[in-house]
Amino acid sequence: MPSPSQTLVPSRLPLVQAPMAGGPSTPELAAAVAAAGGLGYVAAGYLPPEALRERLDRTRALSSAPIGVNLFVPGPREADADAIARYAARLAHEAERFDVALGDPVWDDDAFAAKVDLVASAGVHTATFTFGPPPEAAVATLRRAGVVVGVTVTSRAEAEAAADAGADLLVVQGTEAGGHQGTFDPGEPNSTPLLSALEAVRSLGLPCVAAGGIATAEDVRRVLDAGAVAAQVGTAFLCTSEAGTSAPYRAALLEHRYADTVVTRAFSGRWARGLANRFALEHADAPGGYPQVHHLTRPLRAAATAAGDPDVPNLWAGTGWRSVRAEPVAEVVRRLTADL
Ligand SMILES: Cc1cc2nc3c(=O)[nH]c(=O)nc-3n(C[C@H](O)[C@H](O)[C@H](O)COP(=O)(O)O)c2cc1C
């Protein structure tokens, strides 16, 4: 009989590949993690439903192992349009430099309902949500389809709301994490370290997957000892051959081009941790407003990446980024689970 935690994290090893929307997540990455004994994830964020279907099909073609999918819960429509317009004016010279127009700062729901329906019919093991608890209807649809429901949380209050929403599993994210913070209230950045967050939610009794800054075998051991059923790792996979990380992003990580990471809203209007490149440092006072700011800066970030310039795009990275190596997935998994 599998133990309850194995049913919820069905891989041989208690290691989960973090979903990484925006390029790094690929079917090849998810399949390679699964082949190495971990749980692979498909990142549904930003993808139109047809593209998500293709990713799911391709992942299935590469692996018959259980897989997870991650979705962004739509946020509030309201944003300070004047502040975003002032930010756009400040970015005009950057856009000129790359000869692109800034994007329209529009709100959208990332085709949430269509993607939930798609995920429910795709035979995936788990669906996790970030940026908030999933609506009741989404949980009901996934439940009927036998899909395990997980919610990213950063605090006790969010964990309680996730439990009320019907979560089977919590993904507890510490401030160390690379990428967007899963905070339900986009107003304030999360500054709670992972081990404190795990401690704060423990008494709720839900299985917890721990995420944020996990970069070594000792880090994995530490979160398991703190009661997590698995460690979820993103940054450590960014420079694997199977990831879709762009060339300038990889080089910035591997060559230690920037001194540190920083939590910023400059790229997307939502707090996220990335390498402290010029854009992040110059726009430390950028306004909130997700996904409006994400859409505004997107053409600029894409053009800079295409031009090989790492000073402008978002280079999401967790605090363990200095341990990142250019290795195949199997080697990263072996290294991270060496103490188990
Ligand atoms: C490039 C990148 C993209 C990410 N995209 C997502 C995402 O689409 N959905 C999500 O829930 N978390 C996302 N995250 C956060 C991860 O789920 C996880 O919390 C984080 O990677 C853990 O910290 P680490 O990067 O230090 O391992 C992303 C992280 C990175 C580095």
Image (spheres, grey):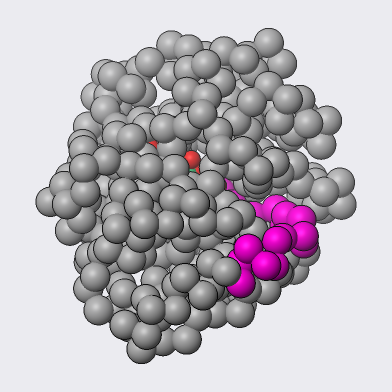
Residue 326 visible at all: no
Q: Position of residue 135 (x, y in %)?
A: 82, 48
Residue that appears at 26% across and 64% down:
310
Residue that appears at 60% across and 30% down:
154
Nearest the eye: 85 or 75: 85
Q: Please determine whether, in this image, residue 207 is positioned above or below residue 44.
A: above
In the rendered structure, the answer to whether residue 197 lies left or right of residue 289 reads left
Residue furthest out toward the left: 255
Q: Quadrant of the C terminus?
A: top left
Which region is colored magenta?
Answer: 64-85
Residue 215 falls inside the magenta stretch: no
Residue that appears at 76% across and 56% down:
76
In the rendered structure, the answer to whether residue 148 lies left or right of residue 224 reads right
Kindly indicate the quadrant of the structure image that contains residue 289: bottom right
Q: Please determine whether, in this image, residue 154 is positioned above or below residue 181.
A: above
Q: Position of residue 15 (x, y in %)?
A: 41, 33
